[in-house]
Image (cartoon, rainbow, N blue to C red):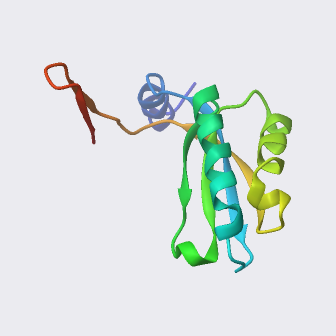
Amino acid sequence: MPSAAQIKIAELLKGMLRLKLFVIFSQGKGLDVTPYLADHLQYMIALEREGKLFASGPLGDPSKADGMTIVRAADEEEVQRIAMKDPFVIHGIRTFRIVPWTVMEGSLSVTVNFSDQTATRS
């Protein structure tokens, strides 16, 4: 028989999102990213348009070239392929590690104003 704590935990978990994603933690090598930044940004935008990219951006001091990219993928092999095609990785600017992530709680708000076609997020 489940304990009171187990019952409460199950009750709290039952409605949570459980969205399976992967996080690519990229570690810079302190090298100048400028020669490859446009290619990297184009690659990230292409992933976004394909629906693979959930979120991406630099971590901490941008000059270190550390970053985090969260992707939607079927499995870790697909994520590996995505990470290996990043121009920063191809040109030796970054190394990476992949961590599976399950989104459970949080929120996202978007307001779209039809009158002037603006949008805000929070």
**Res. 51 in view:** no
Q: Looking at the image, which residue sits at the far top?
A: 114
Q: Is residue 44 visible?
A: yes
Q: Nearer the viewer, residue 29 or 106?
A: 29
Using the rendered view, name the quadrant where residue 112 is placed. top left
Q: Above or below — where is 92 with respect to 112? A: below
Q: Is residue 38 above or below residue 105?
A: below
Describe residue 103's horizontal placement relative to residue 95 as left or right: left
Q: Residue furthest left?
A: 115
Q: Position of residue 43 (x, y in %)?
A: 68, 44
As drawn, 1 above or below 37: above
Is residue 81 or residue 2 the one in the foreground?
A: 81
Residue drawn at 43 percent across, 22 percent down:
15
Q: Please state the horizontal and vertical placement of residue 102, each as a whole percent of the image.
A: 59, 38
**Among the 4 quarters of the image, the one containing residue 47:** top right
**Among the 4 quarters of the image, the one containing residue 37:** bottom right
Q: Give the image location of residue 55, x and y in percent.
A: 53, 44
Residue 100: where, in percent of width, then height? Answer: 70, 43
Question: Which residue is drawn at the image coordinates 70% and 80% (left, top)?
Answer: 30
Rendered residue at 18%/19% (across/down):
114
Q: Is residue 72 above or below residue 30?
A: above
Give the number of marks.
0
Q: Where, quadrant-wise, is the N terminus in this rendering?
A: top right
Residue at x 69%, y 52% (from the top left corner): 39
* 76, 91: nearer the viewer: 91
- Quadrant (top left, top right, bottom left, bottom right) of the C terminus: top left
